[in-house]
Amino acid sequence: DTATTEIYTLSLHDALPILFIMAFTAFTGAASHFVIGGAPDLPCLVFCILSTLLWARVAALFANKASAATLNRATGVVLVILGAAIMIVGSRANNAASAVCAGTRIIRVP
């Protein structure tokens, strides 16, 4: 088999730096959003936190019972779906921005 999958187990000593890097990256992203746009909508924030905890638990249960090949396929499917969703949302946002720009008049002052 040319496509092999290896699953590594990390010790706490190896996993903690990765955890801190991920937490710091998430914190900086969140802090920049606060600076740019103010505080988030509280119900939306609570929903995001609760759904993240729920689906992380579901994913962990699935990952502990699935084979490596199944996990690879599931990851691929999820990434394709997320990529398509981002492309659709981005396309709609670009179309909306284009419509707004098309309706704007540019006044040139001599």
Image: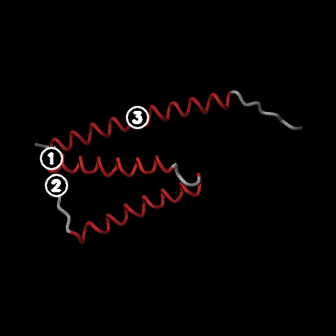
Q: Is residue 64 above or below residue 25?
A: above
Residue that mark 2 sits on: 7
Amino acid at circle 2: Ile
Q: Find residue 85 and name its label.
A: 3
Which circle's residue, 1 or 2, is located before the other in the chain? Answer: 2
Q: Residues within 10 Å of mark 1 (few under 14, many from 20)?
A: some
Q: Is residue 56 above or below residue 91?
A: below
Residue shown at 37%/60% (left/top)?
Answer: 22
Amino acid at circle 3: Ala
Q: Is residue 87 above or below residue 11?
A: above
Amino acid at circle 1: Ala
Query: In the figure, residue 17 lies in which quadrant?
Result: bottom left
Which circle's residue, 2 or 3, is located before the other in the chain? Answer: 2
- Which of label 2 and label 3 is nearer to you? 3
Which circle's residue, 3 or 1, is located before the other in the chain? Answer: 1
Residue 10 lies, in percent from the top left, at 20, 64
In the image, 47 versus 35, the foreground residue is: 47
Residue that mark 1 sits on: 68
In the image, 98 versus 55, the foreground residue is: 55
Q: Could you tell me which secondary element the residue under label 1 belongs to? A: helix
Q: Quadrant of the C terminus?
A: top right
Q: Could you tell me which secondary element the residue under label 2 belongs to? A: loop
110 vs 45, left or right, is right
Q: Are marks 3 and 1 in contact (CB under 8 Å)?
A: no
- Which of label 3 and label 1 is nearer to you? 3
Residue 46 lies, in percent from the top left, at 42, 51
Q: Is residue 18 above or below residue 91?
A: below
In the rendered image, the residue lying farthest to the right is: 110
Could you give the CA–CA distance between mark 3 and mark 1, rounded to whole angstroms?
A: 26 Å
Residue 80 lies, in percent from the top left, at 32, 36
Q: Residues within 10 Å of mark 3 (few under 14, many from 20)?
A: few
Residue shown at 47%/47% (left/top)?
Answer: 43
